[in-house]
Image (spheres, rainbow, N blue to C red):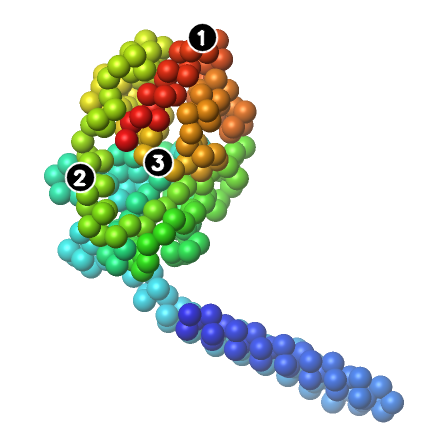
Amino acid sequence: MTLFLVMSFGAALIWLAVIAVVCFAMRSQRHVVTEPVASRLILWGGAIVPSAVIVAVLSYAMWLMPSLRPFAAAGEAALRIEVTGRQYWWSVTYHHANTPAVSANEIRLPAGRRVELALKSDDVIHSFWIPALGGKMDMIPGRTNRLSLLAQKTGVFRGVCAEYCGTSHTLMALTVVVMEPSAFETWLAAEAKPSPGVGGEGEALFLRHGCGACHHVKGTQASGLLGPDLSHFGARQRLAADIAANTEANIARFIAAPDAFKPGVEMPGFAMLPAQDIRAIAAWLKGLR
């Protein structure tokens, strides 16, 4: 808020300088302005004053930046979340205690607690940005960038990829859920365990049709690493990197024709499967909570 007020004040000064020049020009239409006066007016009103204000605001922003985006001190961030950008989805791993929890396309944070995000990319340059919580940071193949976030209040926020990364760049978003600390701890403990929804006909069809070759589901034989981890998939709010609501109908549509949702997606379509098989798999995935 302080930075916003300072930038607004600087913008107002520049605006007033421009208006003053306009008013002077209008008042002086009936009088001859000498070349030295015109030169000083252009120099001060068009160069020196705006440049001084911009330099002052930029210097203040640079001075303030460490407090806006601080790196977590050793031991300060009890939770480290590894986020990997891929075309066109997000892999999310929570490193907490001794058991990591893996998710995709959704990040959950505890309110009032600082969290360290380790940002990576497996293919091209992406950019991680949650506008309501902090500035953006690039995700560059071959290196790890670190971002420290402190969410102040609970709620659901939207994150995006802010670097053009291919055909479905604009469809690469993620949901960020900020929870009360106690609720977050309960959720994280459950996330590290298999979903109570595993088993049954849906799981058998999921494995029979080869879905487990690309996707991992904790507590089942599905151990693929190419696609998003689908453990506890049914508890996520959105589908396919925040494209649609996570409903059985949308899941079934995505299984049949993923390219219709997200052009360029690497997942093949399964429209050749019997409709009842697709519906059964969709129901099973929605039940993984």
Name the quadrant of the N terminus.
bottom left
| Relative side of 189 to 33, left or right | left
Three-letter residue code for mark 1: Pro
Compute the Cα span from label 1 to label 2.
37 Å
Of residue 205 and residue 62, the one placed in the foreground of this image is: 205
Residue 236 badge? 3
Residue 174 percent location from the top left of the image = 41, 41
Three-letter residue code for mark 2: Ala
Q: Is residue 157 above or below residue 42?
A: above
Q: Secondary structure at mark 1?
A: loop
Compute the Cα span from label 3 to label 2.
16 Å
Compute the Cα span from label 1 to label 3.
26 Å
Residue 189 badge? 2
- Looking at marks 1 and 2 on the same chain, the residue that comes earlier in the sequence is marked by 2
Name the quadrant of the C terminus.
top left
Q: Residue at x 32, y 30 (%)?
A: 233
Three-letter residue code for mark 3: Arg
Q: Is residue 23 above or below residue 4?
A: below
Q: Secondary structure at mark 2?
A: helix
Of residue 46 and residue 287, the one placed in the foreground of this image is: 287
- Looking at marks 1 and 3 on the same chain, the residue that comes earlier in the sequence is marked by 3
| Relative side of 13 to 182, left or right | right
Q: Which residue is mark 1?
A: 274
Q: Secondary structure at mark 3?
A: loop
